[in-house]
Image (cartoon, rainbow, N blue to C red):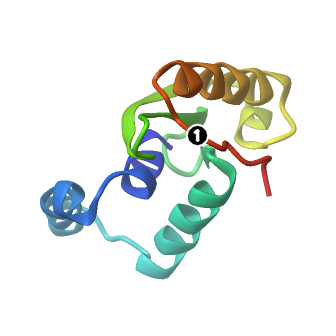
Amino acid sequence: AAGTVLVAFLPPAVTAAALAAEARRESIDREAFERAVDRARKTRQAFADNTVIPGLAAAACPVLHWNGEAVAAVALISPDRELARASHPAAISLRALCDRLSKEFGAQQLKAAA
């Protein structure tokens, strides 16, 4: 989840080497990953269900700089599989926190989640 939001909000030149290394180590469904990155760009959230790490779910949001690029990704990890849903109270609070931090870093016009 954290990697997805970083890929969504960092320039490809910054993420290309890490993505290539990951692709050499792991089998990646590129279409599914691109859909997750696109969704993260729209909602400023990414999720991982228990298929990534058995027994755990994750939610992540970016902290954005004035230029719209990520300066950090903040993630929550839990055995609560419902955390992998945007409607989970912890995921909602996480996004509110990261949006507040983004505004403090000068991010402009944070749109509502799609």
Residue 92, compared with residue 48, is above or below; it is: above
Q: Which residue extends farthest bottom?
A: 31
The residue drawn where x is 57% and y is 51% is: 51
Q: Nearer the viewer, residue 105 or 30?
A: 105
Label 1: few (<14), some or many (≥20) within 10 Å? some
Residue 98, compared with residue 60, is above or below; it is: above
Q: Nearer the viewer, residue 95 or 56?
A: 95
Q: Position of residue 79 (x, y in %)?
A: 66, 24
Quarter residue 76 falls in: top right
The residue drawn where x is 59% and y is 34% is: 58
Residue 32, compared with residue 11, is above or below; it is: below
Quarter residue 23 falls in: bottom left
From the viewer's perspective, is 20 left or right of 70?
left
Q: Nearer the viewer, residue 15 or 54?
A: 15
- How many marks are shown on the rendered structure? 1
From the viewer's perspective, is 70 left or right of 36?
left
The residue drawn where x is 62% and y is 46% is: 44
Q: Position of residue 106 (x, y in %)?
A: 49, 28
Q: Position of residue 67 (x, y in %)?
A: 40, 45
Q: Can residue 55 be seen in this snapshot? A: no
Residue placed under numbered mark 1 in the picture: 108
Residue 47, compared with residue 82, is above or below; it is: below
Q: Can residue 108 be seen in this snapshot? A: yes
Image quarter hosting the C terminus: bottom right
Amino acid on which the number 1 mark rests in the picture: Gln
The residue drawn where x is 67% and y is 42% is: 110
From the viewer's perspective, is 18 left or right of 56?
left
